[in-house]
Image: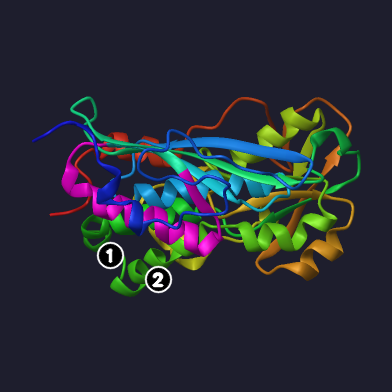
Amino acid sequence: MNFGKVSINKFIYNLPIGDCVICPSIGEDAAILKPEEKYIILHSDPITESKSDSGFLSVAVACNDINMKGAKCKWVNNVILLSDISHLTYVIFGIAEACNLIGCKVIGGHTEVTNSVKQDIVITTAMGTSDRFLSYDKVMDGMKVILVGSPGIEGTWILAKDYEDLLLRKGVSKEVIFKAKQFKYDIIVQERALNVVEYATAMHDATEGGVMQALVEIARASGYTISVNLDKIKVRYETKIITSALGIDPLKLISSGAFLVVTENPEKVLEKTSEAYVIGEVRKGDPVLEVQGVGSFSEDFEEELVRFESSNPGGGKG
């Protein structure tokens, strides 16, 4: 196998490139952008563990973080490190698919095949622009906390596609697994986030460590106690079945596709989106997560998918 940089000719015409003064092309060393708004919002995310769809996931989760500041994701820059050149087409397809769904453009990156990685790594830097942004500095006592989406969306999708045979052996139906595989497109939050941003003071997506970890992080970032009632959280049927079969806590399962909104206008947020519930509120006190009827938490929660995959390194195929 040949290692090293992959020629741009092999994939550039399969990517949604544009919205730049100078765009990626043969011989161009860098893209030139011309923002129209006051602020540029940036975030980078690596996908290092995904067995498939690393291109799609990398763009989706990086853009989600731009959305959490109240902005549309406009541009992405992708660094692709391939373990095998045969994976290139699938990774590029995933990047293009996510970009087309979100409405953002590829404005650069780097692609190579390297024997330094055992499986593909895709690192995406996402960018957006805005004249305003959401900030925890404006969070106040008495504001409500709303969960938009369901816990474990991303994790349920990953388990359904990577551990299908194991789930079947544990009695999970093919119908449940099929429906869980459709969660892929719910990982993208842009439309839902922008629908509610007008009434949000702060937003935070639930990724590693799930909804529980996201709540702890909001407490730390805001400097307030976040008091929640877990009985108010609704988990999708497919997630309940799959996590129960595998002994996984859905509230601590990676949950890209679900996000938390801190707001003083909960009624307006609920009007603007579906699958959303008031689950708690902001209170004066130490920056901890207070779970009503259970106790307070300040330490990080263990990511359930990482724990599960560590115990099942061979996956569920075959």
Task: From the top left corner, tell me how far across and down residue 275 is, in percent.
Answer: 65, 66
**Which comes before the other along the chain, label 1 or label 2?**
1
Point out which mark residue 38 bears: none
Residue marked by disc 1: 171
Q: Main secondary structure of the magenta part?
A: helix
Q: Residue 68 placed where, x, y %?
A: 68, 46
Q: Residue 117 versus residue 215: which sits nearer the camera?
A: 117
Q: Which residues are magenta?
A: 82-107
Amino acid carrying label 2: it is Lys
Instruction: Identify residue type, mark 1.
Output: Gly
Numbered mark located on residue 179 in the image: 2
Of badges 1 and 2, the one in the foreground is 2
Q: Position of residue 225 (x, y in %)?
A: 80, 33
192 up-or-down from 200: above or below = below
Q: Residues within 10 Å of mark 2 (few under 14, many from 20)?
A: some
- Image quarter for residue 24? top left
- Residue 106 part of the magenta-drawn span: yes
Where is 260 relative to 181, above or below? Answer: above
Q: Residues within 10 Å of mark 1 (few under 14, many from 20)?
A: few
